[in-house]
Structures are given as C-alpha cells and as structure tokens.
Image (spheres, rainbow, N blue to C red):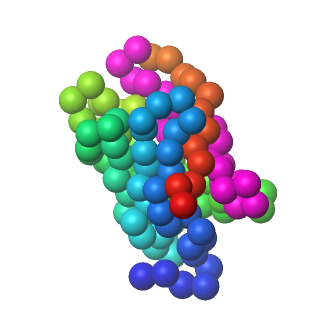
Amino acid sequence: MNTDKTPKHLEGSWLRSDGPYTIEIIEIQAEGKLLAKYFNPNPINVGDASWKKQEGKVQIYVELRDENYPGSIYQLTCDEDAETLRGTYFQAVAKQTFEVSFTKEK
C-alpha cells in the first residue's frame, strides 16, 4: 500500500527509448520494494525490484530472472520533472553494460 513517503509518480508503464522494452511498475511499497513487470515485448520474469532515495533522487533496481536473462539488472534514476528513468542495463549473458533511458507512457 502507498504511503505519503512512497514515490507514487513511479507507478505506470515506462518505455525504453531504443526498443519495445517496458518496465511496468504496479505498486510502490514503503519498505523499498516494488511490484514490477518487464516486457521485451513478451513478459520476462522479474526476480527482484526495489526503490530508494539517495541524494534527493529516487533510484530503482530491477533484476530479471528468466531464460536468457539470468540476473540481468537495471539500475535507474528517476527525473520526475522530465518523466524519465535513466541509468544502466547489465545484460548478464553478454556481460555488457548499456546506458539506457525510459519515458513514462501517458
């Protein structure tokens, strides 16, 4: 359940700028957990998702746990004014890290 201290603006669908990759944040929980789904464009299992505030910014962490996604990780910082998430994506199979950004879908 949301409280006044949770970053409610994270709820919704976020589309990655370079393809049909979507993070859907369903619920933000006060203790730092997120209920999230990931699509590429088909559903990929999310093993862990969380949020925290650091240096005045909301950061999210999404770990994928599925076939071809054994521990791939998004580490993103929210720009609430621009409605974007920016950060890195670690693709575990290729052992490569990419700069990525997501825009909130209206």
Picture residue at 56% right of the left edge, 73% below the top: 8
Name, please, the residue furthest toward the top.
94
Reply above or below: 41 against 28.
above
- Of 30 and 10, nearer the camera is 10
3 drawn magenta: no
Whether residue 57 can be seen here: no
Which residue range is magenta in the image?
73-94
- Of 41 and 45, nearer the camera is 41
* Residue 37 falls left or right of residue 85: left
- Residue 62 picture location, percent across and down: 45, 46
Picture residue at 35% right of the left edge, 18% below the top: 93
* Residue 78 falls left or right of residue 95: right
State the quadrant of the C terminus: bottom right
- Residue 15 picture location, percent across and down: 50, 45
Whether residue 95 can be seen here: yes
- Residue 58 picture location, percent across and down: 66, 59
Name the quadrant containing residue 100.
Answer: top right
Reply above or below: 94 against 52.
above
Picture residue at 61% right of the left edge, 38% below the top: 101
State the quadrant of the N terminus: bottom left
Reply above or below: 82 against 71.
below
Q: Main secondary structure of the magenta part?
A: strand
Picture residue at 66% right of the left edge, 56% below the top: 83
Name the quadrant containing residue 99.
Answer: top right
* Residue 52 falls left or right of residue 54: left
- Residue 28 picture location, percent across and down: 47, 70
Name the quadrant containing residue 71.
Answer: top left
Name, please, the residue furthest toward the front.
106
Name, please, the residue furthest toward the left.
67
